[in-house]
């Protein structure tokens, strides 16, 4: 019998499973506490859980399926972990330290099929979706690293911005978020979680209808269809008007703000005219929009794209600000360890292939 990871079960399902196997609800709550609050590495460490229940758990579930393959620490405290999955696929997870807390950037798929032409992950087509437990376990592994360091550090924020398109693995990602939000467990607040999508408009609307109160970011990167199609072929399926329509629906339904991400690519989308086009694209909704300007992290395989220079970024920012748009330039983390989306993994995969 193939054992499942216990981190794939939301609390209600764990309670139900244990009850179906003759165990009380209170025992399930204790198991949950051992998993997410005390964070044991083995079922046998759950000292106040009876042996019958421990045997059931050991027979049906595994606790740790991810193994650390390598990790790299940046001078700014950012750590990039490369984890090996049971089928030997590699995924990456990044821990970033901020003044406001510690955030973990999780991967949602092995590779990505959206194929944005500037992204390192897009070079590796999708092998498979990650399961909900594989997403939860990335956070558990980083928390384990913190627990071992005994500094009392706790994962306070999660960004779903690693490799993969989270809305192309919608159900598993939503399940994982429910588990990490659970207030009896890791209790990461929904307002500390941000999910980033390349703009799958149907899913943006579905997400607006869901009960999950987490932040949404959309990778826009261009203010016109013509330009966006050049760098993101998904724009042929979900052009800007469909995305804006879904954004309007989301804003009306949830009353929460949305972040639009915009990578500044030298001479391609970083000119004054582009900033003005962006202003006009969002003029009806700008009160509820934050724009996050992202300095491009150069990727060896995409030499046609370069980072905009500092003055150009500031000039772009100024245009948006002058039009009353809430806007920021993203601080970079771990530039010295290639902490941008997909970069370490693509190097490792190439090294293994070569
Ligand atoms: N697939 C989702 C989430 C993962 S990518 C999405 O595209 O939104 C997370 C963010 O990193 C996206 O905004 C993406 O466009 C950006 N990104 C990808 N490659 C990058 C690079 N080389 N430099 C800077 N940002 C990059
Ligand atoms: Fe996939 Fe996001 Fe990279 Fe595009 S930017 S290829 S959607 S991971």
Image: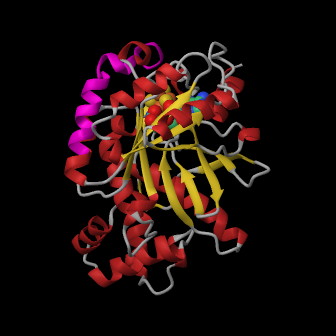
Please name whichever residue, 16 or 219, is drawn nearer the observer in this view of the structure. Answer: 219
Q: Is residue 245 left or right of residue 354?
A: left
Work out which residue is located at the far right of the displayed protein and give it: 75
Residue drawn at x 38%, y 19% is: 224
Answer above or below: position of 131 versus 21.
above
Q: Nearer the viewer, residue 4 or 51?
A: 4
Instruction: Please name the predominant secondary structure of the magenta segment in the image.
Output: helix
Residue 237 is a magenta residue: yes
Q: Position of residue 5 (x, y in %)?
A: 43, 56
**Is 25 positioned to the left or the right of 328 in the image?**
left
Name which quarter of the figure residue 246 lies in. Answer: top left
Q: Is residue 345 left or right of residue 324?
A: right
* Residue under the point 60% across and 16% down: 267
* Image quadrant occupied by the C terminus: top right
Residue span colored magenta: 229-250
For this view, does 241 lie left or right of residue 303?
Answer: left
Residue projecting furthest to the front: 322
Quick check: can you spot residue 341? no
Residue 199 location (% of width, % of height): 35, 32
Instruction: Say whether residue 121 is magenta.
Output: no
**Count of number-bearing discs:** 0
Q: Residue at x 70, y 73 (%)?
A: 151
Residue under the image location 36 percent in, 17 percent down: 225
Q: In the rendered image, is residue 74 in sight?
A: yes
Along the viewing direction, whichever of 30 and 51 lies nearer the viewer: 30
Position of residue 337 measured from the top left corner of the image (x, y, whole percent): 74, 40
């Amino acid at each position: 019998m193939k054992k499942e990871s216990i981190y794939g079960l939301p609390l209600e399902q764990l309670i139900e499973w244990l009850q179906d196997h003759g165990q009380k609800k209170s025992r399930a709550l204790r198991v949950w506490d051992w998993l997410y609050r005390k964070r044991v590495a083995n079922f046998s460490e759950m000292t106040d859980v009876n042996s019958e229940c421990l045997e059931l758990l050991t027979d049906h579930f595994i606790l740790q399926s991810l193994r650390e393959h390598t990790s790299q620490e940046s001078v700014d405290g950012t750590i990039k972990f490369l984890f090996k999955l049971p089928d030997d696929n590699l995924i990456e997870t990044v821990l970033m330290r901020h003044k406001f807390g510690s955030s973990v950037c999780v991967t949602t798929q092995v590779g990505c099929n959206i194929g944005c032409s500037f992204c390192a992950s897009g070079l590796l087509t999708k092998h498979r979706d990650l399961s909900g437990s594989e997403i939860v376990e990335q956070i558990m592994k980083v928390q384990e690293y913190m627990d071992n360091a005994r500094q009392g550090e706790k994962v306070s924020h999660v960004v779903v911005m690693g490799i993969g398109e989270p809305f192309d693995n919608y159900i598993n990602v939503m399940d994982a978020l429910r588990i990490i939000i659970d207030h009896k467990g890791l209790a990461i607040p929904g307002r500390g979680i941000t999910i980033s999508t390349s703009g799958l408009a149907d899913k943006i609307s579905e997400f607006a209808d869901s009960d999950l109160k987490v932040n949404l970011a959309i990778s826009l990167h261009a203010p016109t269809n013509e330009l966006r199609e050049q760098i993101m072929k998904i724009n042929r399926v979900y052009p800007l008007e469909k995305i804006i329509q879904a954004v309007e629906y989301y804003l009306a339904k949830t009353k929460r703000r949305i972040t639009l991400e915009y990578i500044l690519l030298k001479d391609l989308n970083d000119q004054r005219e582009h900033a003005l086009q962006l202003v006009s694209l969002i003029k009806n909704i700008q009160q509820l929009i934050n724009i996050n300007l992202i300095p491009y992290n150069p990727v060896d395989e995409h030499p046609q794209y370069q980072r905009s220079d500092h003055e150009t970024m500031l000039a772009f920012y100024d245009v948006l600000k002058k039009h009353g748009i809430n806007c920021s330039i993203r601080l970079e983390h771990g530039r010295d360890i290639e902490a941008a989306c997909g970069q370490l993994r693509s190097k490792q995969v190439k090294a293994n292939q070569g």
